[in-house]
Image (tube, helix red, strand yellow):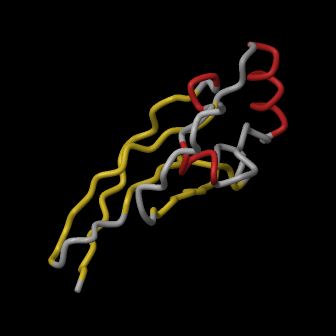
Amino acid sequence: SPPDPPVPAGPQIVLSVYGPDFFGHDVVRGYGAVHVPFVPGRHKRTIAMFVPESTSRLQQLTSWFTGRRPEFTDPRVVAQGEGREVTRVRSQGFVTISFNVI
């Protein structure tokens, strides 16, 4: 029989951070996701951000000249993580957020 689908671990916040590059183009600066805590109180979470990278030198050079960098078209890719192991990504810093849960 086929395996059961994965059970969702609860709601998540998915971040897509954009900013200008050297040429003034608005490009992705990082993606990240974190699960929302269920326990009441104040919670601080640090999210490791990452960006997808081109797989070849030619694609990297072309994207640098055109200002078009690789982006995810579906935010579920960031939230699920499934299939990301075959995607080349680069670490791009951290974002810290605070939750106040009641």
**Residue drawn at x 71%, y 24% as measured from the top left:** 54
Q: Nearer the viewer, residue 83 or 98?
A: 83
Of the 4 image quadrants, the one containing the C terminus is bottom left
Q: Nearer the viewer, residue 50 or 33?
A: 33
Up/down of 8 relative to 57, above or below: below
Single out the residue that lies furthest toward the top. 57
Q: Nearer the viewer, residue 9 or 45?
A: 9
Q: Position of residue 26 (x, y in %)?
A: 70, 55
Q: Position of residue 94 (x, y in %)?
A: 36, 47
Single out the residue that lies furthest toward the bottom. 102
Q: Position of residue 14 (x, y in %)?
A: 51, 59
- Counting labels gives 0
Residue 39 horizontal side relative to residue 25, left or right: left
**Residue drawn at x 15%, y 77% as measured from the top left:** 41
**Residue drawn at x 59%, y 32% as measured from the top left:** 84
**Residue drawn at x 60%, y 56% as measured from the top left:** 18
Residue 49 horizontal side relative to residue 21, left or right: left
Of the 4 image quadrants, the one containing the N terminus is top right
Up/down of 13 relative to 62, above or below: below
User: Toward which corner of the image does residue 11 lie, by quadrant?
Assistant: bottom left
Up/down of 100 relative to 28, above or below: below
Single out the residue that lies furthest toward the front. 1
Q: Position of residue 12 (x, y in %)?
A: 45, 62
